């Protein structure tokens, strides 16, 4: 019989103990994992209150009442109160019309209570509670039912409110017209200091015959008809405004002695204008001042604008008399006033020149008459905004989407003007509009018609508009502009002028003149 090996059982024992040690290792790892998990859970429990404490202000911030949303919400008590209050206000009006003053007083009292409650809720930032709102809702509902029982039914309410709406619309329209008239009066009103200056200069002109003789000699200067010089025309009865236009043009010219200014004013301002420009240094520039009352050729048989509107036309009476002023329409007669000139630059009296303007005289006009800056970057500056295209006379001849342009700084080729007979065009359209159905009063609408197809667009930087009404013009655009235009009611010489733009105009006022100093001090 064979003997077993001595070490036969030893490997079995070793394998058994290996499994035991493996199980013990697994138990140890599992214990460590349980310990780590338990520790993390304890930390989460400890940190949660802190986190909640940190988040609680944010949650509270989200709970703050948005009262606008509260009033919009269909389920809120605030909206119910607001709607009841609106209905109650309507019944107050109706009750007063029916002389039910007691009901009107009760409704007004409840309305005030509603307003007080809503204001308190908005102030504290919390929605209304049922306990707060229910008493007022019930009392107001009771009064509304009482008003309905008094035959203030829905039909009566609608009819009454319609009549009140129409009355309010009429009052609003009247207020708009009135504010327009007041604005125009404010724009026309001459400040006391400027009136004083006019009086002093007029007296100086009357008392100084030598000054009159000197200015009479200037009238026959050959420079006034020399087409090798640069000619500018200004038509105005405003002394200081005209002086700023001349002074700013001269100040920004490289060679002021080559400039000639043609000023036309009325009989009242004529002497003051002459005296002022005699007393001020123009750096060698020539200036001619004419009195429009001496233009005997400008009469009713020649100029339709001389025929004033009838007294029966109430609408025209509400408009600024500036639009009926012959000085304002004189721009359409430039070739007749200066028959020997070939090209001029027209400047309105509410502009300020900031750069050299003589390059305008060498611009290529491509046979056109009027060089102007177009204003159709915005849709409302197209022809259809100025003219009545429901009239076949307008719609058959003009494009409603044609681009509008600006008066204020214009280059006029007078040779091309005479060839195209633009003044006759202007007369034709003025005669067609005697009833005021083609356009409202003003010079731009007839200008758009007379110069239609004859306008050369200029670079926008030559002429920037809006300083008399627009407070938000880009400063970079103003700085780059050759001419800035204070069109609108807020003229820079008035108190209602826009403060941001006033220095641009005031720096060209000759404040050193003794008459002006005396008048401002007075």
Image (cartoon, rainbow, N blue to C red):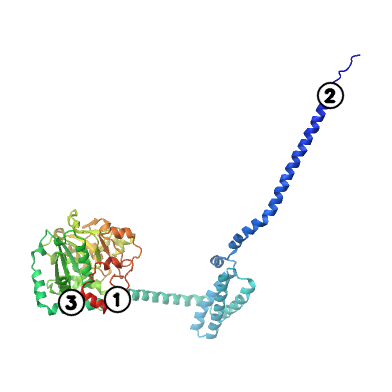
Question: In this orientation, which residue lies closer to the viewer: 481 or 319?
Answer: 481
Looking at the rendering, which quadrant does residue 471 occupy? bottom left
In which quadrant of the rendered image does the C terminus lie?
bottom left
Q: Is residue 369 visible?
A: no
Q: Do the residues labelled 1 and 3 touch (CB within 8 Å)?
A: no
Question: In this orientation, which residue lies closer to the viewer: 102 or 180?
Answer: 180
Where is residue 420? Give x, y as percent: 16, 59
Question: In this orientation, which residue lies closer to the viewer: 21 or 252?
Answer: 21
Q: What element carries label 2?
A: helix
- Judge whether 345 appears above or below 299 on screen: above
Task: Tell me, for residue 185, which label it has, or none.
Answer: 1
Q: What element carries label 1?
A: helix
Of all residues, the one furthest to the top in this rendering is 1
Q: What is the C-alpha distance between the residues marked 2 and 3?
A: 138 Å
Q: Mark 3 points at which residue?
A: 201
Q: Mark 2 points at which residue?
A: 10
Q: What is the C-alpha distance between the residues marked 1 and 2?
A: 125 Å
Q: Which of marks 2 and 3 is nearer the N terminus?
A: 2
Q: Are marks 1 and 2 in contact (CB under 8 Å)?
A: no
Task: Tell me, for residue 40, which label it has, or none.
Answer: none
Residue at left 79%, top 33%? 21
Closest to the camera, between mark 2 and mark 3, is 2
Q: Earlier in the sequence, mark 1 or mark 3?
A: 1
Q: Is 110 on the left or on the right of 196, as rendered?
A: right
Where is residue 161? Give x, y as percent: 47, 76
Q: Is 20 on the left or on the right of 341, as rendered?
A: right
For label 3, count other residues whose C-alpha is less than 10 Å away and answer few (under 14), some (14-19) or many (20+): many
For label 2, count other residues whose C-alpha is less than 10 Å away and answer few (under 14), some (14-19) or many (20+): few
Q: Earlier in the sequence, mark 1 or mark 2?
A: 2
Q: Is 66 on the left or on the right of 304, as rendered?
A: right
Closest to the camera, between mark 1 and mark 2, is 2
């Amino acid at each position: 019989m064979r003997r077993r090996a001595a070490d036969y059982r030893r490997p079995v024992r070793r394998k058994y103990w290996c499994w035991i040690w493996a199980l013990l290792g697994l138990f140890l790892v599992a214990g460590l994992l349980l310990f780590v998990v338990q520790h993390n859970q304890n930390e989460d429990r400890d940190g949660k209150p802190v986190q909640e404490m940190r988040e609680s202000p944010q949650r509270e911030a989200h709970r703050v009442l948005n009262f606008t949303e509260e009033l919009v919400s269909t389920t809120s008590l605030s909206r119910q109160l607001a709607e009841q209050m609106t209905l109650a206000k309507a019944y107050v009006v109706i009750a007063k019309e029916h002389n039910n003053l007691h009901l009107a007083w009760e409704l007004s009292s409840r309305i005030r209570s509603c307003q007080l409650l809503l204001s308190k809720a908005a102030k504290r930032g919390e929605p209304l509670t049922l306990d707060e709102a229910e008493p007022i809702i019930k009392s107001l509902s009771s009064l509304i039912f009482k008003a309905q029982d008094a035959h203030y039914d829905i039909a009566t309410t609608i009819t009454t409110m319609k009549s009140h709406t129409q009355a309010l619309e009429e009052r609003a329209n009247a207020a708009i017209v009135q504010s327009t008239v007041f604005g125009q009066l404010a724009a026309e009103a001459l400040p006391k200091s400027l009136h004083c200056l006019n009086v002093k200069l007029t007296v100086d002109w009357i008392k100084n015959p030598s000054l009159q003789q000197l200015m009479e000699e200037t009238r026959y200067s050959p420079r006034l008809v020399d087409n090798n010089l640069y000619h500018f025309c200004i038509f105005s009865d405003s002394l200081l405004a005209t002086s700023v236009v001349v002074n700013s043009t001269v100040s920004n010219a490289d060679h002021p002695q080559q400039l000639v200014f043609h000023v036309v004013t009325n009989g009242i301002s004529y002497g003051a204008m002459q005296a002022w420009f005699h007393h001020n240094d123009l750096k060698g520039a020539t200036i001619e001042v004419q009195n429009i009352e001496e233009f005997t050729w400008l009469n009713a048989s020649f100029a339709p604008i001389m025929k004033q509107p009838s007294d029966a036309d109430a609408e025209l009476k509400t408009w600024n008399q500036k639009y009926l002023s012959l000085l304002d329409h004189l721009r359409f007669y430039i070739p007749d006033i200066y028959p020997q000139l070939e090209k001029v630059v027209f400047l309105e009296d509410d502009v300020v020149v900031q750069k050299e303007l003589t390059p305008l005289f060498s611009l290529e006009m491509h046979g056109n008459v009027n060089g102007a800056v177009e204003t159709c970057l915005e849709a409302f500056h197209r022809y259809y905004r100025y003219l009545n295209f429901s009239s076949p006379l307008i719609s058959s001849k003009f494009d409603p989407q044609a681009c509008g342009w600006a008066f204020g700084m214009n280059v006029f080729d007078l040779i091309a003007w005479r060839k195209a007979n633009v003044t006759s065009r202007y007369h034709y359209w003025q005669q067609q509009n005697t009833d005021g159905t083609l356009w409202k009063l003003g010079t731009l609408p007839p200008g758009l018609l007379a110069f239609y197809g004859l306008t050369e667009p200029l670079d926008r930087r030559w002429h920037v508009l809006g300083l008399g009404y627009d407070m938000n013009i880009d400063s970079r655009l103003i700085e780059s502009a050759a001419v800035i235009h204070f069109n609108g009611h807020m003229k820079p010489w008035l108190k209602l002028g826009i403060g941001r733009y006033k220095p641009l105009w005031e720096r060209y006022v000759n404040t050193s003149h003794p008459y002006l100093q005396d008048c401002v001090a007075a």
